[in-house]
Amino acid sequence: MAGGRRPFSWRDRYPEQVTCVRCLQVKDTVEVDRLLWCDDCQSAAKSRAAFWGWLGGFVIAAALAAYIWVAIQPSDLILKLWAVIPIAALWLGGRIVREVVYGVERYRNRRAVDAFPPSRDPGPRANGGPRFPDQDGEGQDGPADDDPTD
Ligand SMILES: [Zn+2]
């Protein structure tokens, strides 16, 4: 009722903070959904699903286009009409794949997949923590210079 307040919801009875199961960051309860995914992790999963949706749509459309080209062999006059089918398959199949991928990810609900290991964060403790091999192989053999016994 006060100015600017959001409408009452059942979550208002539990005002404490919770940890998002995906990124392991502490969020306010209003920022997570019932699966304890925060808004950032939901949008990250949605954009990943959108990528796979486009990929799946392209695969379906390409397969349909190849089938039409090889098996049906339309004449030049109605080729444009047949071209509508792969385009529709790209759009519709992409949406279906996207929803399926997102639904599967929600169903599996894997923990901490969007979390970063703390030792990889660039911070004051980064030098003292365990070293991970870099992409170019650096850091695998540890400190080689400061060994006076050799
Ligand atoms: Zn999260």
Image (tube, rainbow, N blue to C red):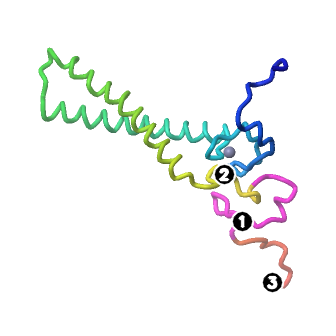
* Relative height, residue 48 to residue 21 (above, below): above
Quadrant of the rendering where the N terminus is positioned: top right
Q: Where in the image, quadrant-wise, is ligand 1 located?
A: top right
Percent x, y of residue 8: 74, 29
Q: Residue at x 61, y 46 (%)?
A: 35
- The amino acid on which the numbered mark 1 sits, given as a three-letter code, is Gly
x then y, percent, for residue 150: 80, 84
* Residue in front for this viewpoint, 7 or 82: 7
Image-quadrant location for residue 129: bottom right
Mark earlier in primary sequence (3, 2) = 2
127 in magenta: yes
**Drawn side of residue 106 relative to residue 37, left or right:** left
Q: Position of residue 20 (x, y in %)?
A: 69, 48
Query: In the image as oriented, which residue stretches furthest toward the top?
Result: 77
- The residue wearing badge 1 is 139
Q: Residues within 10 Å of mark 1 (few under 14, many from 20)?
A: few
Q: Tell which tag, 1 or 3, sits nearer the viewer.
A: 1
Residue at the spot 84% in from the left edge and 65% down from the top edge: 128
Q: Residue furthest bottom?
A: 149
**Element at badge 2?**
loop
Q: Is mark 1 within 8 Å of ligand 1?
A: no
Q: CA distance from mark 3 to mark 2?
A: 48 Å
Label number found at residue 21: 2
Residue at image location 43% in from the left, 37% down from the top: 53
Q: Would you place residue 126 above or below residue 77 in this image?
A: below
- Disc 3: CA contacts within 10 A as few (<14), some (14-19) or many (>=20): few
Q: Residue at x 77, y 73 (%)?
A: 144
What residue span does the magenta drawing correspond to? 121-140
Residue 150, numbered label: 3
Q: Is mark 2 within 8 Å of ligand 1?
A: yes
